[in-house]
Amino acid sequence: MMTEQKNWRGLLTDCAGLIFAAVWATRGAQAGRLSIALIVALIALPTVLLAFGFIRRNLILRRPEITLDPKLARRVKILRFIGIFVAASWTHAHHRVDLFYPLLGAIIGLSYIPLGHALKEPVHLFMGGAIVLISGISLLLPEPQHLEVAGFGTALAIWACSAVRLWRSGTFLTPDTSSTTLA
């Protein structure tokens, strides 16, 4: 769906998700003690390419994702911040800071599921489920492997689902075929 306005708010939201993925990937790379050059290459390439895709979708093609249930989306975002605050407080109070990142991933992943309903975007449902699964698996691993799995796994889920969202919106189509409606 095309609009006449550029979607700056959507672009900022999409880029915030990419920044979140980059932070998670960096955390995983640090736990894995990868070289700085490899970290930059592994994280910068998908982040920059996807950011350009979101710029194209939101500002040039003007095909934003539409929130069909704004009240649910707003509640999800508020509950996400409350959940993060509770997880940070609990892990700090119980001296289990090592569990913060996997719990954070689970909270973020769980929040994508109702957000997918609010946007009527099934990709968010899969991304949320994948992040929760990755976070759960990472809790079973010893430190630092749980940070590597949680970090890289979460980033990969976000990057892959971002690419699918861009593809579904017709962002990757050439100008000649951009008027084609995707099912």
Image (cartoon, rainbow, N blue to C red):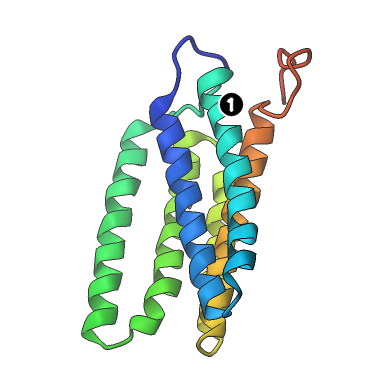
Q: How many labels, in total? A: 1
Secondary structure found at label 1:
helix
Mark 1 surroundings: few (<14), some (14-19) or many (≥20) residues within 10 A = some
Taking the spot 56% from the left edge, 86% from the top edge, the residue there is 141
Report whether 32 appears left or right of 66.
right
Q: Nearer the viewer, residue 140 or 28?
A: 28
User: What percent of the width, then of the height, locates residue 140?
Assistant: 55, 85
Instruction: List the single residue furthest toward the top.
Output: 4
Q: Is residue 9 visible?
A: yes
Residue at screen point 53% across, 90% down? 142
Q: Name the residue nearer the viewer: 158 or 144.
A: 144
Identify the amino acid type marked 1.
Arg
Position of 20 compared to 90: left or right? Answer: right
Q: Is 58 located above or below residue 97 in the figure?
A: above
Rendered-image quadrant of the C terminus: top right
Which residue corresponds to mark 1? 56
Q: Is residue 16 above or below residue 64?
A: below
Where residue 124 appears, as percent x and y from the top left, is 54, 46
Q: Residue at x 59, y 34 (%)?
A: 52
Residue at 21% over, 83% down = 93
Query: Residue 66 location in percent, x, y?
Result: 47, 27
In the depicted structure, whether residue 53 falls above or below residue 104:
above
In the rendered image, the quadrant that contains the N terminus is top right
- Asked if residue 136 can be seen in this view, the reply is no
State which quadrant residue 16 falls in: top left
- In the picture as drawn, the residue positioned furthest to the front comes out as 37
Q: Residue 134, position in %: x, y? A: 57, 69
